[in-house]
Image (cartoon, helix red, strand yellow):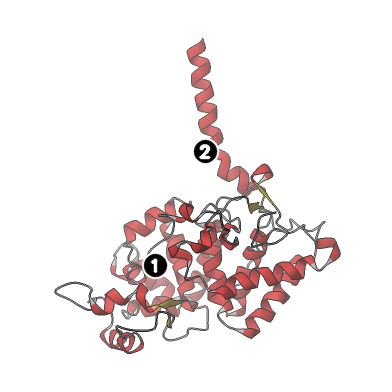
């Protein structure tokens, strides 16, 4: 009898652990703030549009901030937290040091705009504002607009050590990419679709310099890289380049969120190994080819993927709160 009770306990515990992510994401809904801050989406959109008019960097910076946030402890705005004397936060991990300040500023400005409305003050989480801002910058740069699920709480912890091994690296192959995305409930199709956000991305030279200078002893330049493009990259990124120099990831339409990213891969113009492998690996190549010629199919897949991304590690109940300031715990 005691043994059967123990078995039942273990089974119920396993089921509760298995169902936790679904339970957390189940609280997300499109009109979450309908009764507390009904105009929140237009308030955020206006603030984001104002920031966008100041600098286009707002677009890739905000998208990347959302991705880096969700892949580490879930979509809880923990990446925005500032380090203190006693604690090094996520944003100061080496993998996050290249996150552009304009992404952080976009969320902080939008939060200030929301809280300036008396009925909305301290009622909308920074995590939700980041999710809305991401949708808005994608639309502002020519990408698809979509309904954002809301209801996330802000996380209660942010540590640099929690970032270790959680973010994809520019050198990743398809197996490594699939494995990391699968840990977050995302499929290979989702991964390829989200990679399409590199359509408006940028990178510092040191993230891909091995591909143009010391790929291997036999081939200093990565043979999967378009030769003319490799020469162009060498000119923009000489060996002793200023580390602050950033290169557009889409050499053709860098200010438009579109499917040209996949056309670039067909031509050997993927900036990272983790980009180009999507075309060189036969398992992912068919989708690259399909989306290179069908922007609607890519947009629909992207909406599905980023919606799923927004459900990762959602904080509820005692596991989160609504921060007064996005960059500091209450």
Q: In which quarter of the view is residue 115 placed?
A: bottom right
- Identify the residue at horizontal 40%, vertical 75% (top origin): 262
Query: Between marks 1 and 2, how big is the CA–CA gap?
Result: 31 Å
Label of residue 18 in the image: 2
The quadrant the C terminus occupies is bottom right
Q: Residue furthest top?
A: 1
Task: Pick whichever, 275 or 118, lies toward us.
Answer: 118
- Identify the residue at horizontal 54%, vertical 30% (top origin): 13
Can residue 93 be seen here? The reply is yes
Residue 330 lies, with reference to residue 259, above or below; the image says above
Task: Pick whichever, 314 or 322, lies toward us.
Answer: 322
Report the side of 232 relative to 112 (left or right). left
Label 1 vs 2, first from the N-terminus: 2
- Identify the residue at horizontal 23%, vertical 73% (top origin): 215
Looking at the picture, how far across and down is residue 283, in whole percent?
Answer: 32, 61
Please give the residue where the numbered disc 1 appears in the rendered image.
287
């Amino acid at each position: 009898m005691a043994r059967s009770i123990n078995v039942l306990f273990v089974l119920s515990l396993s089921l509760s652990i298995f169902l936790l992510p679904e339970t957390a994401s189940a609280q997300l809904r499109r009109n979450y703030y309908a009764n507390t801050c009904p105009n929140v989406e237009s308030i955020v959109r206006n603030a984001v549009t104002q920031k966008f008019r100041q600098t286009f960097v707002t677009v890739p910076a905000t998208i990347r901030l959302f991705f880096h946030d969700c892949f580490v402890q879930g979509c809880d705005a923990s990446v925005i937290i500032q380090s203190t004397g006693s604690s090094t936060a996520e944003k100061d991990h080496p993998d996050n040091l290249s996150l552009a300040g304009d992404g952080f500023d976009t969320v902080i400005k939008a939060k200030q705009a929301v809280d300036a409305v008396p009925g909305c003050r301290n009622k909308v989480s920074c995590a939700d504002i980041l999710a809305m801002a991401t949708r808005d910058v994608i639309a502002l740069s020519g990408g698809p607009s979509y309904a954002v699920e809301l209801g996330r709480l802000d996380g209660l912890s942010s540590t640099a050590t929690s970032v270790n091994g959680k973010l994809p690296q520019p050198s990743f192959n398809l197996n490594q990419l699939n494995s990391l995305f699968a840990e977050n409930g995302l499929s290979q199709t989702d991964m390829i679709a989200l990679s399409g956000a590199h359509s408006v991305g940028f990178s510092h030279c040191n993230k891909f310099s091995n591909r143009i200078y010391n790929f291997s002893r036999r081939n200093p330049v990565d043979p999967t890289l378009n030769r003319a493009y490799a020469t162009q990259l060498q000119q923009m990124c000489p060996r002793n380049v200023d580390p602050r120099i950033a290169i557009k990831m889409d050499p053709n339409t860098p200010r438009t969120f579109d499917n040209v990213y996949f056309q670039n891969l067909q031509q050997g113009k993927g900036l990272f190994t983790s980009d180009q492998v999507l075309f060189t690996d036969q398992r992912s190549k068919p989708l690259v080819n399909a989306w290179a010629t069908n922007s609607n199919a890519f947009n629909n897949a992207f909406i599905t993927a980023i919606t799923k991304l927004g459900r990762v590690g959602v904080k509820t109940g005692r596991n989160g709160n609504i921060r007064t300031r996005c960059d500091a715990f209450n």
